[in-house]
Each structure stands twice: as structure tokens, then as C-alpha cells.
Image (cartoon, rainbow, N blue to C red):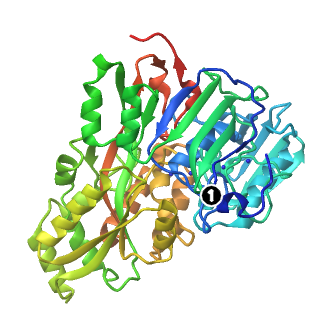
Amino acid sequence: MNRKTLVLPALAGLLAPVLAACGSSDGAGDGVDPIVVGVATPIEATKAAPAPFDPSQAYDVDAWNVMRSTLQTLMRLPRSGTVPVPDAAQSCGFRDTQNEQYRCTLRGGLKFSNGHALTAQDVKFSIDRMKTINNSNGPLPLLDGIDKVETPSDNEVVFHLKKPDATFPQKLTTPAAAIVDPEVYPKGRPYSGFDVVGSGPYTLKTEHRDNRVTKAVFTKNPNYKGGIKARNEKVEMRFFKDSSSTEQALRKGSVDVMNRGLSPDQVRGLQNAQDKGIRLQEMPGQEIRYLAFNTKDPAVSNKAVRKAMAQIVNRSELVRNVYDYTGVPLFSMVPTGLTGHINSFFNTYGNPDTEAARKTLQQANITTPVKFTLAYTTQHYGSSTAKEIRAVQSQLNRSKLFDVSVKGVDSWQQFRTDAQDGKFPVYNMGWFPDISDADNYIAPFIGKQNFLGSPYRNDKIESQLIPSSRHQSDRNAAGADFKQAQDIIADDVPLLPLWQGKQYVAARDDITGLEWALNAASGLQLWELSRGVAN
């Protein structure tokens, strides 16, 4: 896994190096002691990606955490669980037995934070705009199944889908389907800068320096109409250079809450910090980490090379030595705990076996050692990523079958652009779910407009298995299709799953609501946090 009241020139905010404050808050809540959330991942604007909080571009978990609190969607995930509930909508549902027509009725009196009324026409504009901009790095694939949107009245929206899709209600909960103001957001291009104009539970003010957000202040929106009950008046999100800096701020008391990017050492330390006014909440996680391949790159275009890597990589060693069991080995792109999961890579390759890998390469007449560069982003996934990549490099090179070098890229946006442009033969990626369904761990990575820009294609997955699974309103019945898809991926290895992570939220002991801080898609629910009495 993922952004507005002043309309700025295309790159005005992007090129300004000075500290700036912007947003739509009218000052409500000033003087209230905010809950401070520390974030260890930068959110930045670049020339290639100038709109970090625009739904047409944003597609990462930290940006989506901002957007979930400020931009409204028709549906949302509940406090816990995976069945969507109405937010901007009063009610929604399929109106046919084929899951091809989805109709929503909006709540009355909806307004954007600038005072403009929000109607069904704004919902249609937002979806049509996403398709018009067609940002290659954005979340459009979540909505590309929409054929057309109709608005029979100011409070009715009808989605006509190209094919049946039982997962569509969940997709409407994501910031990809966020509703924006047509008088603010340009129809044909992203809305540059760090402003947000939305109708969500909070308004937003941001501060930024050198095109990176340094602070985001969320103030309870008095005009919000939806299903969320905010348990605080104000939340302040501060951005740090790394998780160590964030933890230091938490221990000093200048930050109340932190999650994401915690290293194993930090997890252990925070587990033992209860006597120092800190507690750590552990939750099941659906974050995964994997290697992605440019299957047209000469170094890895032969499937035998990728299969040999799958036979060598030792996931248990990674989980033990790098992550100290804060994750579990993953043998499929679909994580454990989701309907349809199967250990396809283990079933196909078994335990790590260098001799089997050697035989695989010999039978394909591959000259060894196979040489390539393994790329990763240094900041986006936490401080342990570099250690993880070095461990994978060591495993492959120890076999004498590979000669792997590594390359770290500081800028997340640059890393994403370079990966999509095919500049890396192999690169490390993570995935937080958009929706809590096996579909979201297969469909985004397969097909013409896949999230990675991968050239890999598989007609059976694209044309048969995914469409078949989306016919099934009962997601248990879709499991057989997902299992077949996972077996195909294990055989072709366009992706190589590594591990599945647990989720942690650390907080000062006077903060309540931690047990509800993350939803089923690992999204941060700022509105659940409140300040109580320290234990």
C-alpha cells in the first residue's frame, strides 16, 4: 500500500525550499494538547511525483494514513473486521446477482472542508479524474474495473463494472476512491503540493521543508458527516529521519505514538520499557516483503535463474538473523491468515538446496556465477532493510552460483520511478494491503497495468483465475482460484516472497485506543487514539 484548499501552480510548492505552512484548517482546536504521532518514513514531492497527497498519485501506506483521515470515501473499513461499512454513503450495495452494478446513496449535508457541498457528481468526477490522469505509479488498477459512473440524482451514484467484482466494496474503502472537490483538483493532472481539501474526520495543516513534509496537524472537522467518531480533537504527525530518532522522541515524551519501521532491537527494547511509561501493542500483520524481477532484463529473463534463487533463499535464516522472529517466513505472495493462502513456494522448492539450484542452472545452460545488482530503498521500509538485503546477497553469493552486488536508493519516489522504468533487474519491495483479501496480493502484480510495471504476463491468472474469483461473493469459495494462481507464480517466479511481518504500535502509557489503532488493511486510525490516565 498511498492527498488540498489553495490551488497552487504546478510546481510552486515543489520548488520552494523555505519552510511553509498550508492547508484548510480554520484554526479550530488551536490550544488543544494534540496527540503526537511519530513517523519514520519521509513523505516527499518530486518532479516526477509532485502530488504526495493526491489520490491519483499517492500509493504508499504513509501517504494513505494522512488521506484516510482527511479525504472521505463512500465506504470505509470498520473499527475491526473486513466487511465495509458506509461513510460518505448512507447505504451501498450490489443491485444485480452478477456483482456488476453497485449503487450508493449519499448522506445528506456533506461538505468539503472549504465549505463546498459534496454531491454524487463529485464522486463521479473523482473516479473519472483518476482514470483521466492514469498515473502509472498511482492506485488506478484498484478502480480500472469501473466501466462508467452514473449519477441519477445529487445523492445517488451507480457504478457499472466491466466484469463482476465481489471485492469492489472493499476497493471503495481505499484512498484511491477518495472524493475530491472539482473546483480545487484539476481534472487532467495531479494537484501539486501538500494541501488537502476533503470531507473526512479531520482538516489538515502541513509544514514542509526541501519538498518533504516535516509536520502534519489534523484538527477535528466540525462539518464531518460519516460513521467515524473521533476520540480526540487534534493529532500532530511529526516526521523523523529514521525509527531510532522516532523512538528517542517517544522515550523523551515529545512523541506519544509510533508504529511502522521498528527494528527487532527496538521491539525488544520497547517490550521492556513498560516501567518507563511506554507500552507496546502487538497485532497480527499482513505486511509482506518480496523480491521483484524485471523479467525482460537479460540477467534474470531466463526462468531458470529465478527458480534457482527460489531454491537458495533461506527465509528462516532471514527471519531469525535479521528480524529476530518479529516476522515469519512467507512461501506465497498471499500471507497466512487470508482465505486462499497456500505455501506454494515451499511445495515447489522445499528447503533451501544449493545443489538443486546448481542443477536447475546447468539444465538451462546458464553460465555461472550469474551476475546482477539487487536494488532496495534505504528509507521507506525501515532501518532493517539494508541488513535484509545484505543477508539475501550473502545467501546467493555463498552458493557460488551468483555474483550479486547491492544498490541502495535514498528517495522512495526515485526508487519507484527507476523500478517501473526497468532499471533494476531485481529489487526489494514491501506490500501493505489495500484491502484484506487474497485478490489484493495477486491482481495488483499481474497484468498490463500492474503496480510494479512488470513485463511478466500470465493469461490464465489474468483472464481466468482473477475474474473467476471475483464472481464469488463468498470469499471462501474463491480460495481454489487463488491457490492455482499462487502455484503458477511459484513456478514462473516473477516475484519471490520472503517474509510476513507482525504489526506493532508503541505509545506512552496515557494513550488509549491502541488496540484499535490499525484496521484490517494495516491503516492507521488516528481517530481511535485518545489521552487517558497513565497506568
Is residue 524 shown left or right of residue 332? right
- The one nearer the camera, 73 or 338, is 73
Front position in the image: 398 or 20: 20
Q: Quadrant of the C terminus?
A: top left
- In the rendered image of this protein, does residue 169 appear above or below residue 314? above
Q: How many marks?
A: 1
Instruction: Kindly identify the residue that appears in the image at 24 percent across and 67 percent down.
Output: 310
Looking at the rendering, which quadrant does residue 534 occupy?
top left
Question: In this view of the protein, which residue sits in the foreground, 12 or 63?
Answer: 12
Q: Residue furthest right?
A: 153
Q: Is residue 361 above or below residue 409?
A: below
Which image quadrant for residue 125?
Answer: bottom right
Q: Residue at x 23, y 74 (%)?
A: 404
The answer to whether one can see residue 366 in this image is yes
Residue 295: horizontal and vertical position, in percent?
39, 78
Query: Which residue carries the number 1 mark?
Result: 17
Residue beneath the point at 17% across and 49% down: 321
Q: Is residue 324 above or below residue 516?
A: below
Kind of residue sitting beneath label 1: Pro
- What percent of the width, then of the height, locates residue 361? 18, 81
Q: Nearer the viewer, residue 487 or 400?
A: 400
Mark 1, residues whose alpha carbon is within 10 Å: few (<14), some, or many (≥20)?
few
Secondary structure under badge 1?
loop
Q: Quick one: which residue is furthest to the left in this view?
A: 355
Taking the image as shown, residue 147 lies to the left or right of residue 320, namely: right
User: Residue placed at 18% from the left, 51% from the top?
Assistant: 316
x and y, in percent, of residue 373 in the image: 30, 75
For the question of whether residue 504 can be seen, the reply is no
Q: Residue 15: x percent and y percent? A: 66, 63
